Amino acid sequence: MIEIRFHGRGGQGAVLASELLAQAAFLDGKSPQSFPFFGVERRGAPVTAYTRIDDRPVRLRTSIPNPDVVVVLDPGLLGTTRVTDGIRPHGLLLVNTPKSSEELEAPDGVRRAAVDATKIALSHGLGTPMMPIVNTAVLGALARATGVVSLEALSRAIEQFVPRSPVENRLAARDGYTTVRTVEVGALLSPLPVGAPVPRPSGEGPIAVVPSETIHTAAWRTFTPKIHLERCTKCNFCWKFCPDDAIEFDPQGFPRIRLAYCKGCGICAAECPPKTIEMLETLA
Amino acid sequence: MAKLTIPSQELMYSGHAACPGCGGALAMRLLLKGLGPRTIVSLPACCWTVIGTPYPTTALRVGILDNPFEATGASISGLRAAADVLGMKDVNIVGFAGDGGTADIGLQALSGMLERRTNAIYVMYDNEAYMNTGIQRSGETPWGAWTTTTPVSGDLHGKPEPKKDMMGIVLAHRPAYAATLNPAYPEDFDRKVERARDIVGPRFLHIFAPCPPGWKFDSSETIALGRLATDTGVFPLYEVVDGRLAITRKTGALKPVEEYLHAQGRFHHFTPEDVAKIQAQVRESWDRLVQREREDLSRPH
């Protein structure tokens, strides 16, 4: 059995990717399973989804703490989410990034693969520069780097199950397949026994004590506010209306964005009476 | 620093998992500013359990009790009983439930808590559908609104039933205090929270909580839309103290509801007749509210 974990952000298609992979494996005659993590399914928020592929029916019904393959649809997640947690030795980390596979960080023994799925997606008109739909290009790369499904089965699954632009998505998968860069391309995966114990935090009862401020939500952002202080009247409207308490005051009493927490909703810019706040596009 | 019009204390941590522009997150932030640190919040299943309490994290500097969907009213009755036994007199006991957890699933527990005269504050933050699970209609979804379970296609025209009148249901229990609050008006919001805080007995706060993904509007427009809701009369701001109703925000003339409806994708299918129907209903309930205020004023104390 091969266990694959997808990391993306809400809206990028990570859940659909896990389903498409399972559909492709089914067309290849395998017994797949796929499901998303039931968690924070917010626009822009980190999303996790799982696929299992085996030659026999899959009886396991748990999430995947020890994946053979970790797929990262958004390179911005590498700084905020511990994507390789629990990855098996000799597993594979596949990342959508313009970088080379050698530049990726992974635990010892883990193979690394890179594909510029954002560029591929945009070249086929999938999504927008702020929110490219990268899942099919990444799946093409996954097919090549792991051999878990054939490109033919993947193409057929895309044509059957992708709701919009099936042709462009099939071409994106092909481009992902041909351009993926790995430290060594080839059949992965000497399947390892499942059931390794899941590491859990020790010494804590069922009481949550970790402040949510330890979580940085900057990666949710597609636009970043910039305050032009020369026109600021210190009216505090931006502070008053921020749902994330992401605005503080400097010693002179001017507002300052707490960039680690700002999700880029744009309320501050919309509500600022003298319109001193500008929303600027930010790429992860 | 310029003078602040609402308390400076922050009892909600950043880093929580609310969507960008979430009205419910702003509601919690403003609520805790007014209540202060001696507060315990009971959360049933709702957006806020996911926003604020993915284990092992917490988004509040005050205590949280996670409880089942239907149990908010019962849980705050239990918390108050425990506080009384422990001799804790200065603590605010607060239930913070969504509209589904209040108007549908938690209605009997709320009614029981009000009927027992539990000395606690029950908050319904109203985003007008089951948003956390993906926009299913609730008893608080307004007539005609699109949700995933009240689709718009062919003969289907959004939700066929009107919004449940939760303030009416609560007022029938004669609470010590009940009010409608809107985060777009933070000063009015804070004044009501502080007033509720200082009253003894069952108290109910109905908070308007615009939801950008669920109502289909841009996350930057949460406050503007909130203002429109009140200024069109769709969500009037008032409070009821010992049975006496007072409208706390009056504008010369109500704005046309069209401005509020057209700002949201969930009403995009509305015809001019639909808008006129809503306009007539809003007008009628506003007139009833003004009439009730007038009667309460003329009633001897």
Image (cartoon, coloured by chain):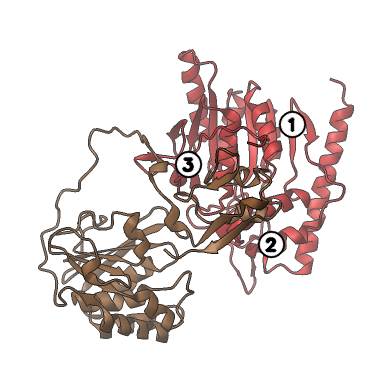
Chain colours: A brown, B red
Tell me, yes or no, whether dots 2 and 1 are on the same chain: yes
**Residue A222 in picture, x, y percent from top left:** 49, 62
Please report whichever mark, 2 or 1, sits nearer to the chain's N-terminal start. Answer: 1
CA–CA distance in space, label 1 to label 3:
27 Å
Q: Which of marks 1 and 3 is in front?
A: 1
Residue flagged by tag 2: what amino acid is it?
Ala
Q: Nearer the viewer, residue B194 or A181?
A: A181
x then y, percent, for residue A166: 41, 83
The residue marked by circle 3 belongs to what chain?
B
Depth check, front residue: B206 or A92: A92
Could you confirm whether marks 1 and 3 are on the same chain? Answer: yes
Q: Residue at x 75, y 60 (%)?
A: B259
Label 3: how many residues lie within 10 Å, few (<14), some (14-19) or many (20+)?
Answer: some
On the image, the x and y values in percent for residue B177 come to 69, 28
Q: Is residue A73 above or below residue B290?
A: below
Q: Which amino acid does label 3 sit on?
A: Phe
Q: Label 3, on which residue?
A: B69
Q: Earlier in the sequence, mark 3 or mark 2?
A: 3
Crowd class of label 1 (few under 14; some 14 to 19; many from 20; radius 10 Å): many
Any part of residue A41 in sight:
no
Quarter of image, res B267? bottom right
Marks 1 and 3 close (CB-CB < 8 Å): no
Which mark is drawn over residue A176? Answer: none
Q: Is residue B267 visible?
A: yes
Identify the amino acid type marked 1.
Val
- Indicate which disc residue B240 carries: 1
* Residue receiving disc 2: B263
Q: Quadrant of the N terminus of chain B?
A: top right
Q: How far is disc 2 from disc 1 in space, using C-alphas?
A: 30 Å
Q: Which chain carries label 1?
A: B
